[in-house]
Structures are given as C-alpha cells and as structure tokens.
C-alpha cells in the first residue's frame, strides 16, 4: 500500500494477513461500521470479504459470492472496488465459465452489512461474443473497475488482452435488472 498526505512524499507498506495473498484485493472506498473492508479472492474461486484495523493486516471474513451460474461456474472475482449507491454496494464481478470464457456480471451488497448479497445479475452484463471473442487471449472480457457519474455507470474493459473499450449503462436501468437474492 502506498500512502501519501500530499502526493509528493510517499510511504510504502506491505500488506499482510491471511486475506492479503491474492492480486484480486479491492478496498471499499470508505469504512463500513467502523471497519476497513476489502473484497478478495483468497481461495482463487470465490469472492470474499476481509477486514483490517490498520489497513495493513487483513483478516478473511468469509465468502460473499460463490460461482453458481454457467457463466461463472469455474471462478468469480471482483473487478475493482465496490461502488456505493443508495441501494447498496455495486460490485462488478468477472466470472469464468466453460472453455475459460471470461464474462462480466454484477452483485449488489448490503450497505451496512457487505457480507450479504442482496441482488445480482443472473446473466452477464458483458460477455465475449462477435468481435469481443478475438484477441491475444480469446474469449475474455475483463475490467479493473468502473466509474459512476451523473447516473451513468462507465465501464472500461479489455477484450482478449488485445483491445480496450468503454461501455456505459444507466444506473437505474442496471439496478432494475438485478434479481433480489433470498436472505
């Protein structure tokens, strides 16, 4: 972790703890319930939640979302940090399905208890089809995060490790497409 108060002088800290072992770690943009939280994929297959008292040592809190649909049956992980909305934490996820096909989906976590998935997209938001199938690594669309601006979610994404594109969707339209998850 790189820390700076003035963006001219930096301190570098190594992250540690059981939850800090995977490159898929993404910090929540603010503390939740007084705790610093992050999404991880510690076990390599499932989206998990972790917490830290100091931002340096991370403890695994358990699985939040496990692969359950054909498009993410092999593994699931976050695509960047959660995005806060008035309905919950919007989390872009990648899923790996048959033939190592990478698609993008979404889950919505409870604002006060992000260990709870309250809604999800049943089908991928974006999947490799047509021109999105080809590239250095075929059948892959992938993102490292999105930006919410004026009610529109802007999503930069990679195609086949060869091209970069940007898509957008209205937040209201996206939230309306989510299916509630039974508690």
Image (cartoon, helix red, strand yellow):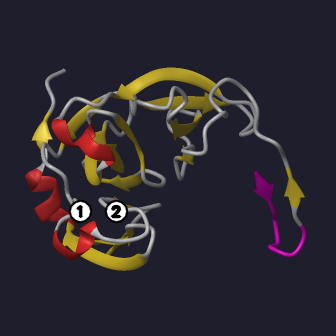
- Residue 4 lies within the magenta run: yes
Count of picture labels: 2
Q: Image point 22% across, 29% down: which residue?
A: 68
x%, y% of residue 94? 35, 49
In the foreground, 48 or 139: 139
x%, y% of residue 147? 40, 69
Q: Which residues are magenta?
A: 1-9
Quarter occupied by residue 104: bottom left
Query: Marks 1/2: CA distance?
Result: 8 Å
Question: What type of secondary structure mainly makes up the magenta span?
Answer: loop
Mark 1 nearby-residue class (10 Å; few <14, some 14–19, many ≥20)? many
In the foreground, 24 or 158: 158
Q: Which mark is residue 39?
A: none
Say what secondary structure mark 1 lies in. loop
Where is mark 1, residue-wise? Answer: 128
Q: Is residue 174 above or below residue 67?
A: below
Q: Can you say which quadrant of the picture contains the C terminus?
A: top left
Q: Image point 87% across, 75% down: which residue?
A: 8
Sequence order check: which comes first, mark 1 or mark 2? 1
Residue 79 shows in this picture: yes
Mark 2 nearby-residue class (10 Å; few <14, some 14–19, many ≥20)? some
Where is mark 2, residue-wise? Answer: 138
Between label 1 and label 2, give the one nearer the viewer. Answer: 2
Say what secondary structure mark 2 lies in. loop
Residue 150 shows in this picture: no
- Residue 2 lies within the magenta run: yes
> In the rendered structure, are the residues bearing label 1 and label 2 in contact, judged by CB atoms less than 8 Å apart?
yes
Apparent side of residue 162 relative to residue 130 in the rendered image (left or right): right
x%, y% of residue 61? 52, 21
Q: Image point 84% across, 47% down: which residue?
A: 13
């Amino acid at each position: 972790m790189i820390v700076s108060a003035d963006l001219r002088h930096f301190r570098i800290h190594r992250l540690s703890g059981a939850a800090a072992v995977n490159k898929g770690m993404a910090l929540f943009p603010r503390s939740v319930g007084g705790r610093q939280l992050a999404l991880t994929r510690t076990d390599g297959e499932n989206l998990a939640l972790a917490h830290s008292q100091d931002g340096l040592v991370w403890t695994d809190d358990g699985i939040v979302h496990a692969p359950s649909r054909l498009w993410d049956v092999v593994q699931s992980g976050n695509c960047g940090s959660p995005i806060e909305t008035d309905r919950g934490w919007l989390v872009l996820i990648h899923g790996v399905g048959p033939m190592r096909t990478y698609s993008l989906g979404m889950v919505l976590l409870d604002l006060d208890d992000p260990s709870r998935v309250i809604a999800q997209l049943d089908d991928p938001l974006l999947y490799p089809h047509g021109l999105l199938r080809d590239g250095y690594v075929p059948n892959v669309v992938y993102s490292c995060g999105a930006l919410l601006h004026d009610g529109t979610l802007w999503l930069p994404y990679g195609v086949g490790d060869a091209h970069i594109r940007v898509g957008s969707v209205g937040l209201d339209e996206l939230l309306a497409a989510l299916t509630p998850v039974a508690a």
